[in-house]
């Protein structure tokens, strides 16, 4: 476990953590216990579930133990982006943090993303798997996915004149003002790139911090590299041209 201090609860604005899930019954309990352990007492955790396995049952049981956890069944789930939109509409926090449920990102590193926001160094912080200092555990970043991430981040950085090393980061944090200012339109996986590039375009301070990434231990990834890679590159072009 990385040796990182929890976020102090005094003087820290209310944080909302959004976790989108699509059949994550094997990871969700461990994920939530680790998320709750590093959060201040006044935080909230929203799980927006589009799957059909036992995730909902597990989250509802945990929400009795930890009242900060709220389960949202996303009945007509249209993708990860759609689930995040639903989470944002319900979120009360002035700081938002998104983390994948599959534990590829470590909940213990969430404070590392919140710190630049609370110290007013940034408005949006991407947890980068590729920045110097990032740790990629075995199996976490297969070559094709690494290339796809590199290409997408390079293209986004070029289009928006701002260096981002991991524009598809599955863990990121931002001020509420960011999502209230920009218009998020993508309901698919392109959402992950949409948020940071539109934040850059709107003049917000977007930075990367290095994080650890691990291999998926259970469940299956919803991402299809060629189909989704092409879609994300096209959507990035649309964002630049103001078409989306
Ligand atoms: N609600 C919802 N969650 C999703 C969907 N697709 C992915 N997720 C969740 O979003 C997170 C990241 O997805 P994942 O498949 O691990 O993407 P990858 O890490 O890029 O392979 C995980 O917690 C998934 O369960 C979706 O269509 N709907
Ligand atoms: Mg994953």
Image: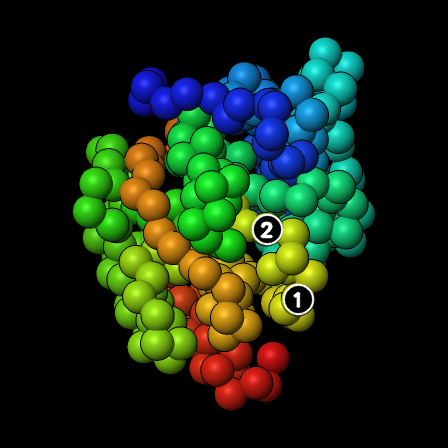
Q: Residue at x 61, y 24 (%)?
A: 10
Give SS at disc 1. Answer: helix
Quadrant of the rendering where the C terminus is positioned = bottom right
Taking the image as drawn, is residue 190 in sight? Answer: no
Taking the image as drawn, is residue 244 in sight? Answer: yes
Binning the other alpha carbons within 10 Å of mark 2 as few (below 14), some (14 to 19) or many (20 upward) gives: many
Q: Circle 1 is placed at which residue position?
A: 181
Binning the other alpha carbons within 10 Å of mark 1 as few (below 14), some (14 to 19) or many (20 upward) gives: few
Mark number displayed over residue 103: none
Rendered location of residue 84, percent (x, y): 65, 51
Mark 1 vs mark 2, CA separation in Å: 10 Å
Give SS at disc 2. Answer: strand
The residue nearer to you, when weighing 153 against 95, is: 95
Rendered location of residue 210, percent (x, y): 30, 43
The residue nearer to you, when weighing 163 against 222, is: 163
Mark number displayed over residue 175: 2
Disc 1 within 8 angstroms of ligand 1 (CB)? no
Residue 11's quadrant in the figure? top right
Residue 113's quadrant in the figure? top left
Residue 228's quadrant in the figure? bottom left
Q: Residue at x 59, y 51 (%)?
A: 175
Disc 2 within 8 angstroms of ligand 1 (CB)? no
């Amino acid at each position: 476990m990385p040796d990182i201090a929890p976020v102090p609860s005094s003087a820290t604005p209310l944080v909302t953590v959004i976790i989108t899930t699509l059949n994550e019954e094997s990871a969700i309990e461990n994920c939530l216990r680790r998320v709750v352990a590093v959060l201040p007492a006044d935080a909230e955790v929203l799980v927006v579930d589009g799957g059909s396995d036992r995730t909902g049952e597990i989250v509802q049981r945990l929400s009795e133990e930890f009242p900060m956890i709220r389960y949202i069944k996303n009945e007509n789930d249209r993708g990860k982006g759609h689930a995040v939109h639903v989470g944002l509409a319900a979120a009360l926090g002035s700081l938002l943090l998104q983390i994948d449920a599959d534990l590829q990102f470590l909940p213990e590193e969430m404070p590392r993303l919140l710190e630049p926001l609370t110290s007013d160094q940034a408005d949006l912080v991407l947890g980068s798997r590729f920045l110097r200092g990032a740790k990629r555990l075995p199996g976490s970043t297969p070559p094709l996915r690494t290339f796809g991430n590199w290409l997408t981040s390079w293209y986004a950085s070029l289009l928006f004149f701002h260096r981002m090393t991991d524009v598809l980061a599955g863990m990121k944090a931002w001020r509420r003002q960011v999502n209230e200012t920009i218009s998020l339109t993508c309901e698919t996986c392109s959402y992950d790139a949409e948020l940071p590039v539109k934040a850059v375009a709107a003049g917000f301070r977007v930075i990367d911090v290095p994080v650890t990434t691990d291999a998926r231990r259970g469940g299956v990834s919803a991402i299809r590299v060629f189909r989704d890679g092409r879609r994300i590159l096209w959507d990035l072009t649309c964002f630049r041209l103001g078409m989306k």
